[in-house]
C-alpha cells in the first residue's frame, strides 16, 4: 500500500493558543483489507504524528465521525498533548457497535502493524492506546478494553447513547483495572446501563471518573452527523478539555514504563495506585485525598491528583452555577 503523506499545519482553535503557536505534524493513511481467517474487518485509517517525534510512546485511538473526526482534525489542544507526550493520533474510519466479534479490534491492531512498516515506525506495533469514542464510538472504546486490556493505557467513553445487553457490559478483572473517564451530557443523561458499568467498576476500586458535562446534550452545539457548525467555545465545553487533557496526560505519565517503551516488544503498563489519588462526590462535589475522603468511596469519582480533582470541580460545579 502506497501511503500519501499530508503536511499538517494545525490551525489555532483555542484561546490557549491565541499567541499563534501551532503544532506541526504529518498525516499518513492506510487501508486494512478484510480477512475471514483470521477475522479482520476492512477499514481505512489515518494517523497523525507530531513533528520531531523520535519515538511514539502512545497512540490516541479516535473513533466515530462527527465529533471524533473533529477531534482528530481540528482540536489543537489534543495535538499539543500528543506533541508533549510523544504520542500519535489514530483515526478509525469504521463505525460499529463493538470490536470483539466482528474483527474490528483486530483491524485496529493490523492498522498499527501496517503503519509500523509503512512509515518506518516499529514502535507503533506495540504502543499502547488511549481510546476515545463518542456515542456508538464509546461502545468501540468500551469493547476494546474488554478485547485487549493489556494494550489500553486509558479510555474515554463520550456520551454513549443506546443501552447494551448484559454480556457486553461485563468486565473481567484485567479490564476493570484500566483507567477511564465517562463523559456524559447533563441534558442527555443516557443510558442507565453505562452508569451501572461505572458504579460496578468503582466498587472494584477501578481508577475511573464520571463527569457530567454541564448543559450538554448528545452533540456539541452546531454539530451532527452531517454538519459541523460548532465553534471552539462550544466544542471545549462539550469535550471537557479542561479536565480531559490534564487527566490523560497524568495517566500517560503514571502508566508508561519509566524508561519509555521498547520498539520491538509489548509494553508492560504500570498499575495505578488508587490510594495515592483523590476522590470527588459526583453529587455534591466534595473533594479529598483518598485516605481523607469521608463519603462513600465506591460511588465517588477517582482522580490522579488534587489539581485534576479541582479542575473537575471547577468545570462541573462552578460552570453550572454560572449558568443559573
Image: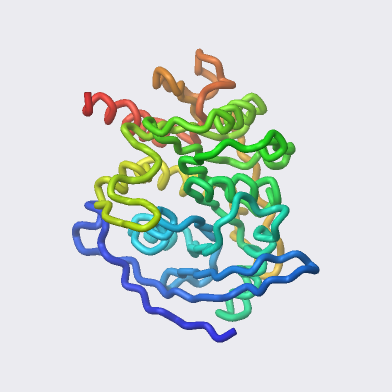
Q: Tell which residue pokes out farthest to the left in this image.
A: 19
Horizontal side, residue 175 vs residue 285: left or right: right
Residue at the extreme right of the image, as rendered: 37
Task: Point out residue 239 in the picture as x, y percentages from the top left corner.
Answer: 37, 45
- Figure check: 136 above or below 199: below
Residue that extends furthest to the front in the rendered view of this protein: 226
Position of 302 compared to 271: left or right?
A: left
The correct choice, above or below, for 144 with respect to 69 in the image is above
* Residue situated in front as seen by the camera: 276 or 74: 74
Residue at image position (62%, 54%) is 257
Give the vertical position of 26 relative to 130 (above or below). Answer: below
**At x 59% / y 30%, what residue is drawn?**
193
Q: How is the image coloured?
A: rainbow
Residue 99 % position (x, y): 66, 54
The image quadrant that residue 56 belongs to is bottom right
Which residue is rendered at x = 31% and y = 57% of the image?
228
For the C terminus, the image quarter is top left
Outermost residue, bottom side: 2
Q: Quadrant of residue 50?
A: bottom left
Amino acid at each position: 500500500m502506497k501511503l500519501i503523506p499530508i503536511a499538517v499545519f494545525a490551525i489555532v482553535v483555542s484561546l490557549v493558543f491565541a499567541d499563534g503557536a501551532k503544532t506541526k505534524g504529518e498525516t499518513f493513511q492506510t487501508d486494512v483489507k478484510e480477512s475471514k481467517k483470521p477475522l479482520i474487518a476492512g477499514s481505512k485509517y489515518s494517523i497523525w504524528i507530531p513533528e520531531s517525534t523520535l519515538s511514539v510512546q502512545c497512540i490516541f485511538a479516535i473513533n466515530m465521525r462527527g465529533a471524533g473526526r473533529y477531534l482528530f482534525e481540528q482540536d489543537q489542544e489534543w495535538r499539543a498533548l500528543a506533541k508533549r507526550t510523544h504520542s500519535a493520533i489514530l483515526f478509525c474510519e469504521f463505525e460499529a457497535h463493538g470490536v470483539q466479534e466482528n474483527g474490528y479490534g483486530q483491524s485496529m491492531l493490523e492498522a498499527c502493524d501496517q503503519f509500523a512498516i509503512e512509515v518506518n515506525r516499529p514502535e507503533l506495533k506495540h504502543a499502547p492506546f488511549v481510546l476515545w469514542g463518542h456515542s456508538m464510538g464509546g461502545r468501540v472504546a468500551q469493547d476494546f478494553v474488554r478485547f485487549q486490556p493489556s494494550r489500553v493505557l486509558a479510555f474515554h467513553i463520550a456520551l454513549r447513547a443506546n443501552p447494551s445487553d448484559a454480556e457486553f457490559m461485563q468486565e473481567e478483572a484485567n479490564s476493570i483495572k484500566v483507567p477511564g473517564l465517562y463523559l456524559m451530557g447533563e441534558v442527555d443523561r443516557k443510558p442507565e446501563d453505562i452508569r451501572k458499568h461505572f458504579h460496578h467498576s468503582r466498587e472494584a476500586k477501578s481508577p475511573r471518573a464520571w463527569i457530567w458535562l454541564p448543559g450538554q446534550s448528545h452533540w456539541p452545539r452546531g454539530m451532527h452527523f452531517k454538519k459541523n457548525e460548532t465553534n471552539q467555545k462550544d466544542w471545549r465545553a462539550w469535550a471537557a478539555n479542561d479536565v480531559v487533557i490534564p487527566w490523560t496526560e497524568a495517566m500517560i505519565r503514571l502508566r508508561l514504563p519509566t524508561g519509555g517503551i521498547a520498539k520491538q516488544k509489548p509494553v508492560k503498563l504500570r498499575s495505578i495506585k488508587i490510594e495515592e489519588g483523590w476522590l470527588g462526590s459526583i453529587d455534591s462535589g466534595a473533594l479529598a485525598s483518598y485516605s481523607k475522603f469521608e463519603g462513600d468511596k465506591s460511588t465517588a469519582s477517582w482522580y490522579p491528583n488534587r489539581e485534576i480533582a479541582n479542575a473537575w470541580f471547577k468545570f462541573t460545579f462552578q460552570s453550572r452555577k454560572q449558568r443559573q
